[in-house]
Amino acid sequence: MSPNSKMVPLPGSERKALSSARAVGPADPDHRIEVTVYVRRNPAAKPPPPSEVLKLPRQRGKPLTPEQAADIFGAAPEDLAKVEAYARANNLVVLETSRERRSVLLSGTVAQFSQAFGVQLRH
């Protein structure tokens, strides 16, 4: 997706301000912020039902390794790569990517995030 791509709202992602909230002014466009983007669980992974989680293969009685847990419950590498590519195309910095947490931590200015995500950040 390029910076000029058409924005498509993700159903269920809309957020309304609290009824007691009021905008007091625009955010400083040069202020640096960090934002965590969460992605869906890997649709190709078939996590077991909760009753079967304790029966998952373990190594000598040890808990699942982070890699095993990520394979079952984590994000698809392709989804994380798409978020990273979109962020970089919009001049955002990728600070950390976690398949296990299904997240990408981004850094940039208020102006960069506003442009990239089509939002107006306010105080």
Image: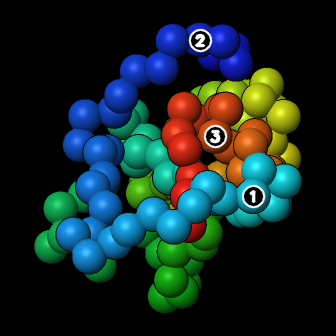
The residue under the point 81% across, 60% down is 32
Marking on residue 28: 1
Residue type at numbered disc 1: Asp
Front label number (2 vs 3): 3
Residue in front for this viewpoint, 10 or 119? 119
Front label number (1 vs 2): 1
Q: Element at badge 2?
A: loop
Q: Element at badge 3?
A: helix
Q: Give the percent coordinates (x, y) of residue 69.
A: 50, 64
Display colour scheme: rainbow
N-term mark: 1 or 2: 2
Q: Is residue 97 left or right of residue 117?
A: right
Quarter in which the N terminus is drawn: top right
Q: Give the percent coordinates (x, y) of residue 111.
A: 74, 43
In contact (CB < 8 Å): disc 1 and disc 3: no
Residue receiving disc 2 = 5
Distance in Å between CA atoms under marks 1 and 3: 11 Å
The residue under the point 84% across, 47% down is 93
Query: Which quadrant of the view contains residue 85?
Result: top right
Residue receiving disc 3 = 114
N-term mark: 2 or 3: 2
Front label number (1 vs 3): 1
Quarter in which the C terminus is drawn: bottom right
